[in-house]
Amino acid sequence: MSSFVSNSKAEENKIEVAYSNDSFELWYLLHLQEVQNPMDRSVIEEKLKSHLTNYYHGKGIFDEIDKHYGQAVKRAKKLLENVDNNHIKPVDANPSTRIHILTEKLRGNKA
């Protein structure tokens, strides 16, 4: 059995999947810049470091990126639209994320 659960299987079981491909940090990067091409997690981390001088210390990072939350949601939706339009499986969808759907629900907004 595959360790990958497809979105359709999750939907059949009324489970919403929140993933970020290639890494969770893609979600953070979308707050700070548009991403259109596949990128390795090490590249994502380097880009985050270039945007956030306190990346390693962590102080104030969430406050800093949260200022750009709306932009991150728009960018994440655009990535998912590309995935949907091209019928790309989530495991192959780099870059893509569904973290915005989770955060919108937690914030009480509609994704």
Image (cartoon, helix red, strand yellow):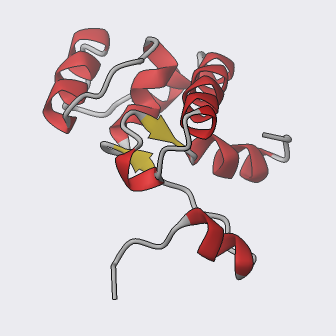
Q: Is residue 53 above or below residue 92?
A: above
Between 46 and 92, the one nearer to me in the picture: 92
Q: Name the quarter where the N terminus is drawn.
A: bottom left
- In the rendered image, the vertical position of residue 74 relative to residue 15, given as above or below: above
Residue at left 19%, top 31%? 56
Q: Residue placed at 66% from the left, 52% from the top?
A: 102
Q: Residue 52's spot in the image, x, y percent?
A: 30, 16
The x, y position of residue 15, in whole percent, is 68, 74
**What residue is rendered at 57% in x and 46% in y?**
98
Q: Is residue 54 above or below residue 109?
A: above
Horizontal relation, residue 92 to residue 84: left or right:
left
| Residue projecting furthest to the bottom | 1
Q: Residue at x 30, y 34 (%)?
A: 58
- Please identify the quadrant where the C terminus is shown: top right
Picture quadrant of residue 23: top left
Image spot of residue 82 (x, y percent): 57, 28
Count of labels shown?
0
Q: Left of 74 or right of it: where is 27?
A: left
Q: Position of residue 69 (x, y in %)?
A: 62, 24
Relative to 82, residue 37 above or below: above
**Picture quarter containing residue 55?**
top left
Q: Nearer the viewer, residue 40 or 29?
A: 40
